[in-house]
Amino acid sequence: EGTSIRPLWGTAQLFMHPRYMHGAATRLR
């Protein structure tokens, strides 16, 4: 479980970033 949560946390932190959010939103849309 710990290993599965580790990558998820890293992605969550990146998404939390405002700069990364803008890039991710443009990529997803």
Image (tube, rainbow, N blue to C red):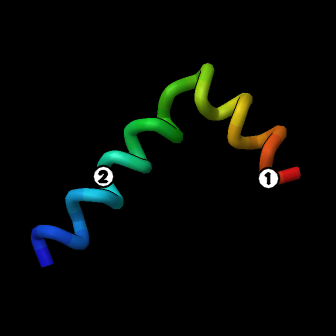
Q: In this image, 6 relative to 7: left or right? A: left
Q: Amino acid at mark 1?
A: Leu
Query: How packed is label 1: few (under 14 Cα within 10 Å), some, or many (20 or more)?
Result: few
User: What is the distance, in whole Å, between disc 2 and disc 1 at their CAs?
Assistant: 19 Å
**Tag 1's secondary structure?**
helix
Q: Is residue 11 above or below residue 1?
A: above
Q: Sequence-wise, which precedes: disc 2 or disc 1?
A: 2
What residue does disc 2 label? Answer: 9
In terms of image quadrants, where is residue 8? bottom left
Query: How packed is label 2: few (under 14 Cα within 10 Å), some, or many (20 or more)?
Result: few
**Tag 2's secondary structure?**
helix
- Residue 8 - label: none
What is the number of callouts on the image? 2
Question: Is disc 2 in contact with disc 1, using a CB cutoff of under 8 Å?
Answer: no
Q: Is residue 29 above or below residue 8?
A: above
> Measured from the top left, where is residue 3 in percent x and y?
15, 69
Q: Amino acid at mark 2?
A: Trp
> Measured from the top left, where is residue 17 in percent x and y?
50, 27
Q: In this image, 14 relative to 18: left or right? A: left
Q: Is residue 6 above or below residue 18?
A: below
Residue sitting farthest toward the top: 19
Q: In this image, 8 relative to 18: left or right? A: left
Going 64% across and 34% down the picture, which residue do you hit? 21
- Residue 28 - label: 1
Going 30% across and 52% down the picture, which residue do you hit? 9
Going 72% across and 32% down the picture, which residue do you hit? 23
Q: In this image, 24 relative to 16: left or right? A: right
In terms of image quadrants, where is residue 6? bottom left
> Measured from the top left, where is residue 2 in percent x and y?
11, 69
Q: Quadrant of the N terminus?
A: bottom left
> Measured from the top left, where is residue 24 in percent x and y?
69, 41
